[in-house]
Image (cartoon, rainbow, N blue to C red):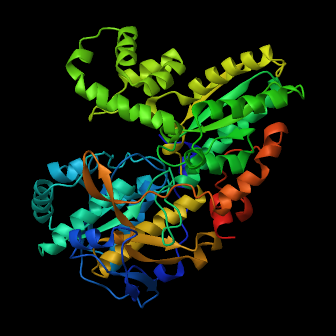
Amino acid sequence: MISALQKARASYAPKLPVALRNGAAVKVVEGAPTTAVADVEKIRNLFAATFGSPVLTFEPAAGESRPAVNVGVILSGGQAPGGHNVIAGLFDGIKSLNPESRLFGFLKGPDGLVKNEYQELTADTIDAYRNTGGFDMIGSGRTKLETEEQFETALKNCRELNINALVIIGGDDSNTNACLLAEYYKKNNCGIQVIGCPKTIDGDLKNEWIETSFGFDTACRVYSELIGNIGRDANSAKKYWHFIKLMGRSASHIALECALQTHPNAAIISEEVAEKGMTLKEIVDYLAGIVAARAAKKCNFGVALIPEGLIEFVPEVKKLIAELNDLLAANADAFAQLADAEAKVNFVAARLSEAGAAVFTSLPAGIQAQLCNDRDPHGNVQVSLIETEKMLAQMVGARLKEMAAEGKYNGKFNTQTHFFGYEGRCAAPSNFDADYCYSLGYTAAALIGAGRTGYMASVRNNTRGADNWIVGGIPITMMMNMEHRHGADKPVIRKALVELDGKPFAAFAAVREQWAVETDYVYPGPIQYFGPSEVCDLVTKTLELEKA
């Protein structure tokens, strides 16, 4: 049983760039040799077989048949709208190379490749998932591919299926793993190509050649619809301040994009907090000041957007978290014996440094408990689970009481808190994401047909419509640098954070003071799939501004 929308959506034919309309057997134009984004010599040494490959641009060709290929595809990491269309584009692309080509989906992410759990993806399977959200066609997972043992096991499993190429659809960590796998297989002449596709709703996998990661457009539209609905309710009831936390573990692209789409009264950008070295008290004072200014206009309501990873960007809290990680690792056995939250909080408070204890005790009791209880498999604080929106709402409320006593605030402050995250990860892709993802998959097929490895599919010129999109591939090593992870320096793709000197942030900064005191909410409404192009084929405000 499928919904009426899903039935109608199944017939949508994604738009392809001109270079791919004759099939994936394209003309390949090579650019100059490339380098890494940083730590060039270290990256060169670690990736001697794949480093320095040129940027590729595709042009239309006659579309002649190529030898059949067997391809494996993996969905890696968290879900993002459009993943099924990447697989559909890959399927159609390899079939355009040769109708005898076959596609195998490894189940539950990279784990399926290592455990040899797979499903052959046929036309019937693919057709059932075109233009749908989710990753449920083959599932996803977060297993990292980074050891020689994993590479060898995967190689054995690929050879059993006569697989010539692997396509890894994922974010920065997943594509880092794709880069490591490509290097190992090329260095050892294994005969298996590895291609990556850029996925993450967080929007932090991008550069000159990857203008946006897929899923960001759809997720931000879903969140912006919800924020608009909240804004309309706030302006109707006129009695609540809504504190809304939005996904974005390391970067604030989602918070910034949703702010540009909806015009909230406040939106905190983590990168600005870090750049200015803002304390938690300064953030609270900033928000309380906006609440007080609106109260002076008899507007005891508002909307504030909070990025998921904010707390780790506040310098004093970042230091506290690092100290907590070390303290609890050193006292793991004793800490494990404590039965209740209060005992754990007291245990931690008594052993922190003076500065750490001052920050820790300034936090609401619930947040103190979360900092003590929520640990990842490495023993570190799971920052994404901390209810930052509730923390700030409580701390702003406490500050407003102080301001009222000082005669600086006269209003009512009632709050509602929200976390918009999973609501956007599996939505049916917008027209942009449906087209973009299909083109990414088709481009991956073209890279396989061109015999390349260690590349990420690139579809750019995204604000100009599919007729003007430029497709090709970029070496994944171009995006790599060295970072200290789990006690060792490791090669990873550098995350793209919000650029404070970039056009999207500048556009936001120019109007946020006006939005703070005025009720200037915009109500984007739900994603439109059918209708005029100016309504259905939009791109994000971020892309509009970056390419203006």
Q: Residue at x 49, y 80 (%)?
A: 21
Q: Left or right of 192: which side holds 266? A: right
Q: Between 167 and 408, which is closer to the camera in this rendering?
A: 408
Task: Examine the image and state in which quarter residue 93 appears.
Answer: bottom left
**Residue furthest to the front:** 354
Position of 331 relative to 380 (above/below): above
Q: Between 340 and 349, which is closer to the camera in this rendering?
A: 349
How many numbered marks does the figure carry?
0
Q: Between 266 and 19, which is closer to the camera in this rendering?
A: 266
Q: Left or right of 203: which side holds 153? A: left
Can residue 73 be seen in this snapshot? Answer: no
Q: Where residue 160 sits: x, y (%)?
A: 10, 62
Q: Residue at x 41, y 73 (%)?
A: 443
Task: Examine the image and state in which quarter residue 169 appears.
Answer: bottom left
Position of 286 relative to 216 (above/below): above
**Residue furthest to the bottom:** 62
Task: Examine the image and state in which quarter residue 431 appears.
Answer: bottom right
Q: Where residue 323 sits: x, y (%)?
A: 36, 31
Q: Where residue 133 sits: x, y (%)?
A: 48, 48
Q: Where residue 279 sits: x, y (%)?
A: 58, 35
Can residue 134 be seen in this snapshot? Answer: yes
Q: Quadrant of the C terminus?
A: bottom right
